[in-house]
């Protein structure tokens, strides 16, 4: 769709849902709606059923963490309309304590996506039929995709051959410090790499 057509679609949605949609924008050929969190079910139902929209496929549902913001999380819904051959992005905001309504009643595929949202970001989802972790272990501490989550995690899990079971232990880094070489392979090193000194000796011998 052209930018003009996307703008017309945005105006159509905004006029039909003037109390639910707080704004829209067009970026990289896609329409993006910002929506009141408590109205997400109504908005997605409209986008699915409206004759000018028909966004009947939920492609993805994910989270974005903005730690400095009061409502630190964006919950983003990516929809696809085969009728329009167009995608649309819908965003709501929430904090660490306020749940987002489940949209499984609109898109059954949202079930696992919402479990992932809870598992990775800790965003609560109200009225979800089975909200539990999906990618981490049930005893996992914290939510790995939060930007304040430590890269090493809090505990490590391993199989203990003596106890014949999985055990949890505090993270122990076997290597406290590592040197990383971020030099581009297309640039010459400003130091002699191990082994290169032999090439220099060979060149001197030829001369």
Image: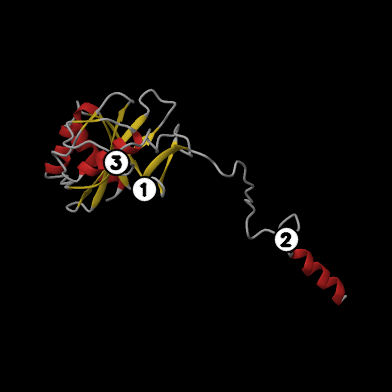
Q: CA distance from mark 3 to mark 2?
A: 46 Å
Quarter of the figure with residue 186: bottom right
Residue 17 visible: yes
Which of the numbered marks, if any, corresponds to residue 164?
1
- SS for callout 3: helix
Q: CA distance from mark 3 to mark 1?
A: 30 Å
Disc 2: which residue: 194
Contact check, label 3 and label 2, Cβ < 8 Å: no
Circle nearer the N terminus (3, 2):
3
Q: Which residue shows up at 75% across the image and 55% down it?
A: 191
Within 10 Å of the Cα at label 3, are there few (<14), some (14-19), or many (20+) other Cα atoms? Answer: many
Residue placed most toward the observer, 127 or 166 = 166
Residue placed most toward the observer, 184 or 33 = 184
Q: Which residue shows up at 62% across the image and 49% down it?
A: 180
Circle nearer the N terminus (2, 1):
1
Disc 3: which residue: 116
Quadrant holding the C terminus:
bottom right
State the image coordinates of residue 90 (x, y, percent, origin top left). Answer: 27, 38
Circle nearer the N terminus (3, 1):
3
Q: CA distance from mark 2 to mark 1?
A: 44 Å
Q: Which residue shows up at 59% across the image and 44% down it?
A: 175
Mark 2, mark 1: which one is toward the viewer?
Answer: 1
- SS for callout 1: loop
Residue 25 visible: no
């Amino acid at each position: 769709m052209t930018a003009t057509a996307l703008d017309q679609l945005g105006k159509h949605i905004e006029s039909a849902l003037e109390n639910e949609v707080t704004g829209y924008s067009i970026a990289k050929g896609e329409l993006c709606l910002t929506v009141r969190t408590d109205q997400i079910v109504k908005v997605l139902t409209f986008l699915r059923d409206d004759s000018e929209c028909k966004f009947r496929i939920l492609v993805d549902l994910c989270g974005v963490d903005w730690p400095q913001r009061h409502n630190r999380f964006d919950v983003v819904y990516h929809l696809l309309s085969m009728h329009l051959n167009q995608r649309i992005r819908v965003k709501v905001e929430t904090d660490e304590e306020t749940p987002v309504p489940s949209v499984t009643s609109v898109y059954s595929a949202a079930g696992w996506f919402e479990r992932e949202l809870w598992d990775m970001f800790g965003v609560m989802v109200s009225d979800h039929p089975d909200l539990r972790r999906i990618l981490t272990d049930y005893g996992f501490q914290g939510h790995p995709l939060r930007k304040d989550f430590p890269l090493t995690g809090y505990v490590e899990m391993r199989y203990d051959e003596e106890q014949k079971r999985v055990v949890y232990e505090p993270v122990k880094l076997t290597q406290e410090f590592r040197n990383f070489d971020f030099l581009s392979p297309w640039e010459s090193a400003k130091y002699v790499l191990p082994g290169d000194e032999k090439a220099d000796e060979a060149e001197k011998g030829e001369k």
